[in-house]
Image: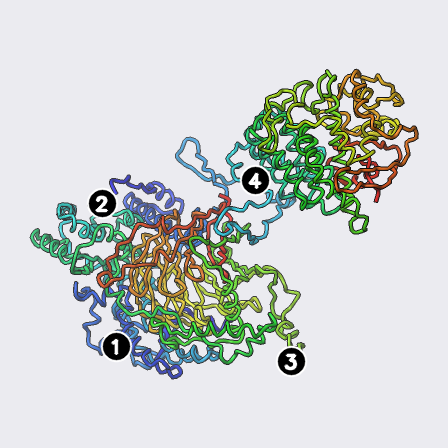
Amino acid sequence: MAEREERRFVELPRDSVRLMAESAGVELSDEVAALLAEDVCYRLREATQNSSQFLKHTRRRRLTVEDFNRALRWSNVEAVCGCGSQDSLPFRPLRDSDLFFPEDREVNLLELALATNIPKGCAETAVRVHVSYLDGKGNLEPQGAVPSAVSSLSDDLLKYYQHVTRAVLGDDPQLMKVALQDLQSNPKIAALLPYFVYVVSGVKSVSHDLEQLSRLLQLARSLLQNPFLCLGSYVGSLMGSVLYCVLEPLAASINPLNDHWTLRDYAALLLGRIFWSHGELVRGLYQQILLSLQKVLADPARPLCSHYGAVVGLHALGWKAVERVLYPHLPTYWPNLQAVLDDYSVSNAQVKADGHKVYGAILVAVERLLKAKAQQAPGFGGPEGSPRHSPPGQDPSPELGLGRPLIPGGSGTAASSSSSSSSPPPPSLRDMYRELYDFFGDSLAVRFGTGAPADPPSPPGTSEGARKEPPAEGAARKMPQLTNATVSPRDEEPPPPPRPERPPLHRSPGPPAPAPRDPRTPSGHRPGARDVFQKCRFAPRGPPRFSFVIAGRQTGRRCPGRRFQTSFPQPPGAALGSRYAQRLPMIGRTARAPRRWPRAEYSLLLLL
Amino acid sequence: MAALHEEPAEVAAVQPDPEAGTPPPPPAVPPAAAPAAAPAAAAEGEAAGAGGDAAPPKPAAPGPAASPAALDRQTLVAVLQFLRRSNLRESEEILRREARLLGDDLGAAALSPSSAGLLGGSGSDADAGEALLGRGTGAAAVAIGGNVAVATSSPGVAAVASVPPGKVGGAVVVEDQPDVSAVLSAYNQQGDPTLYEEYYSGLKHFIECSLDCHRAELSQLFYPLFVHMYLELVYNQHESEAKSFFERFHGDQECYYQDDLRVLSSLTKKEHMKGNETMLDFRTSKFVLRISRDSYQLLKRHLQEKQNNQIWNIVQEHLYIDIFDGMPRSKQQIDAMVGSLAGEAKREANKAKVFFGLLKEPEFDVPLDDEDEEGENEEGKPKKKKPKKDNVGSKSKKQDPNAPPQNRIPLPELKDSDKLDKVMNMKEAARRVRLGPECLPSICFYTFLNAYQGLTAVDITDDSSMIVGGFADSTVRVWSVTPKKLRSVKTAADLSLIDKESDDVLERIMDEKTASELKILYGHSGPVYGTSFSPDRNYLLSCSEDGTVRLWSLQTFTCLVGYKGHNYPVWDTQFSPYGYYFVSGGHDRVARLWATDHYQPLRIFAGHLADVTCTRFHPNSNYIATGSADRTIRLWDVLNGNCVRIFTGHKGPIHSLAFSPNGRFLATGATDGRVLLWDIGHGLMVGELKGHTDTIYALRFSRDGEILASGSMDNTVRLWDAVKAFEDLETDDFTTATGHINLPENSQDLLLGTYMTKSTPVVHLHFTRRNLLLAAGAYSSQ
């Protein structure tokens, strides 16, 4: 209550009053003018005070001309007209005098009348309802809304964020490409990282929309590729979103026409990329991923597409992951898969098709494992077949705990830098092959050991030129050697052995797709490999079309062998060989998926 | 329609004579009304009536002293004068003939406020014709309507005559002149203007040096003394002294008087005093102070010792000191209760008995079968409902000891559709969420988009099926918030074609072509400040700056009646919880009770010293609460028009009111951002909820009364634990007797949650029957 500054009211000078009187033709004495000025001031204040009442009842914060006019009207004073505009009226001084006047520009009515840009009029008043707080908790963000914290960013960043998200999620593919490219290289977007990560985490809310999912994954990929971004703990969040796409039974997969397989492949690829390039940022990330993949695989209640995701995920994480999780789990998993595959009822058709997908994925994975093993086999001196993203000879596994047993309790011989010593009981290559052969029968052999005969020399054009697999460069260099050395132990292979300059995508697709990434051994390894794969039963035959028996039988296990006969369809111009990796670039073009089925990647695809 | 638009002034002039109506069933009404009317009538209200013990009536009131005959004559003259001013020649002629009065008498007669106050008692039989005419128009009224109409009591009439001074200019201003000078004449005896500052600072010194326990109490004197001394100086045209007096002492006043001080500071001339409302409030009412006997003795002794007559005179003439025995109050206790325009409420003002209990719910004996049929239509299982209904019936059979007699206020009979609605309500209630501190309600927000800052009022039907918005552009817009669109009834021509015997006749009469989500009602000529749905959802009320309250049909979406009477902006209106009656309050400082089928008000509740800003019905429909810009809340008895409670404590104009569902408590919100809780039965403040930072425009209790929700201009909704706020109240005899309250500082404990909107002031709150909280407001971009 202490002293307060005396609030000075605006006071009208008597000169103003006299001026007004003069303009009305009245002469005023000083005294009268002074009295009048005082009175006018008082009346003005009174009117202002009254107008505040109208303000309060209109539930506004800002006093308007309208309020003031109301107060005037109720005190029987004429309202002031012409000041109702929202814009402020600028006062202009008259030069060399103390006169100020409001600017009153002339309006050209003719122009106005002939104007073409007729204002549209105001939008209609409307009521919208939304649940603001559920059970008194949490503010439910409307879908797609900008996270509230974004508003605290600078305007430029905010605009950038809005434009990029709009472009990525929008309809224009060209725009999306530009946006993604910028995301990959823009060094100034670090502040926006949390928001983009948040956007990516939106995958969980659009699981019905493959298009959006793949766009979000591409957004994630761009973020991963941006060398200026330090992802830090956001890796975990990104990983979560990607894993979601890999593993979850997406709403989109209900419709068999939706090519969610491609999406899973792409997501798995991304998973591998996150792991290989950013895995060191989060401790225990690898273990965590393996555990979640294993959990999905071990859960028979999960749909086959989830299992598929788990397998391709393991595959993407490298052969060691396959060895540690998939390989030991195979005996328990097999019977379930077989049951699905052996059920010929019509109602099972769809599930069975899914089962074949899983089957194929497993096949590709174990083949890769075998090849990696083969290269490590004694006598193989060269750089081991490390996963495609790691530079040769530089396996990140040791420091990532790759070698450590997944299941606690296993021996922790992780320190070894050589991955071969990692798994506690490293089965010999031979044992492993034998066991796998029991599962897969000849398909393993054909695809692996004697792939060449099955493959007609496909013209380079048949394979997808659009292969976008990001890490291709690393593998590409070693590819040619592999082709000639490992895959074609015998010399019947049509392509001539030395073809070092050929990029993998144009290579004949003889061996299964993973082959390109698989042991890229120098030609010198050939003999060893051939030894290992001697079990192949079928002599390679020239013609591209043939039929053979897949006899998976598990000796010593209770499962009956799986016997059926199939013939590989020969889609026109398509290679039989797996194009697992080559399909990846097709992400997002879901519309084409059905057409591509006949020549889909896995050799065992059955046309239903 | 036009026929119903009577001259508004006539409402004031027409006296509702006792014998004109149908036989009045509550026989107590007319006699009770008459004596009560006179004192309550004059603008000074209770001050004049009850202030006798502390100070003599004001010298300017010769009325009461005059002989009855002279009094009658004076009254008649006053009435005639009024009629003439209001251009009601015919009525004037009739009255004059009846009274055999000569025209020139009028000129001599002066209309003093006291004579106006007594005007009600005499009653003017001459206007019986007019009154009957009024009844005639309302012939369709149910019997109850007529009964209540009889009771229209005189305070309102008096209030109209004396209340809105200096607003309309012209005739009324002329009338003001004697009024004001009479009031101000008290200032005529003046001391030496130069000594005023000395007097004041002397008293100030005395108070500041007194014992702590007395200082707080005596400090209450500062503000009224300051104001009156300043006004005396101004009135006696000592402008410079007045200014310096103001300069020197205005800083001592409590911060919550700032708004009034600002008005005062601009008042420096005697001429200005005539039209100034705030100033008039000060003159026409006595500022009430509650002081313990000890402190009062101290003050009296001091003033007598010092021979300080100037101050003593003011204390005698302009203050009402309510002396109580016992301990002096602490500063905190005092601060909680003061702040209104006219000081605290007198203790006597809150002594009357209030029947705050709920009425017995009507039992569904007769229509039980009907309901079952309805139930069958809806669920196909009529059997199940019987036990449930019995439960409900047994619950309501217990008569609340605090409830008013069932027929204290005649209430409309339930229609079949009402019963059906009640059944629906019960069904919904069974599925109601039990709220509590652990279980807070979900909040749905209805945002008005593109309202261009024009949303002024919102209401939602009890069943949450419709929402109405009143806008500054004079429109009323009704939206359906369910998939069911709004349809109006077919035209008369089309209706005649309908088979009236068909089962779905109610469906057939609706015009499918008119179905839409939004209906706009045009008719007002000023911002619509208040809206209210009738409980049966057939009618809608809206009140506006244009001085009218309009009744709209939600069947045809047309205006049915325009109720004129306020003549000034009407700030709020609300339907009774039982329908039929409604209340309105406005800038003319009175609240009016209406019945939908009467174009004149049934009651006029006069007594507030400033605008009536909000009005609410008690759940039992026997009482009406009004909040005012004079920073008080009053509770009025619908039966006799008496003011039964005055609550002071808010420091700003009151803008929201809410009764608790059990009728025991009242919550009020004001521009000071505080919510105050009141115990109606004891007439005590029982809680203070601090937290909002701006005007509270919406208050609502949850359906079972566990949660109080408040919505404010500060873009938040806050939820308060009402159960905790009302438990273990200090209602022992001492507290009740003295009105001393000790409020715990527990706002933070009671606050259960604060919920922000993006940029939307909360204008309305509503709990659905299942306790989902709906909030509404217009998005404002700044």
> Residue B663's spot in the image, x, y percent?
38, 65
The residue carrying pointer 4 sits among few (fewer than 14), some (14 to 19) or many (20 or more) residues within 10 Å by Cα, namely some
Cα distance in 3D space between marks 1 and 3: 61 Å
Give yes or no for contact between labels 1 and 3 (Cβ–Cβ under 8 Å): no
Q: Quadrant of residue A201?
A: top right
Q: Is residue A184 left or right of residue A130?
A: right
Provide the chain ID for the residue under circle 3: B
> Residue B541's spot in the image, x, y percent?
48, 65
Provide the chain ID for the residue under circle 2: B
| Residue bearing mark 1 | B72
Whether labels 1 and 2 share one chain: yes
Cα distance in 3D space between marks 3 and 2: 77 Å
B187 versus A454 height, above or below: below
The residue carrying pointer 2 sits among few (fewer than 14), some (14 to 19) or many (20 or more) residues within 10 Å by Cα, namely some
Q: Secondary structure at mark 2?
A: helix
| Residue bearing mark 2 | B252
The residue carrying pointer 1 sits among few (fewer than 14), some (14 to 19) or many (20 or more) residues within 10 Å by Cα, namely some
| Residue bearing mark 4 | A146
Q: Amino acid at mark 3?
A: Glu
Q: Quadrant of residue B682?
A: bottom left
Identify the coloring. rainbow
Cα distance in 3D space between marks 4 and 2: 51 Å
| Residue bearing mark 3 | B501
**Residue drawn at (81%, 36%) of the image:** A600
A63 versus B483 height, above or below: above
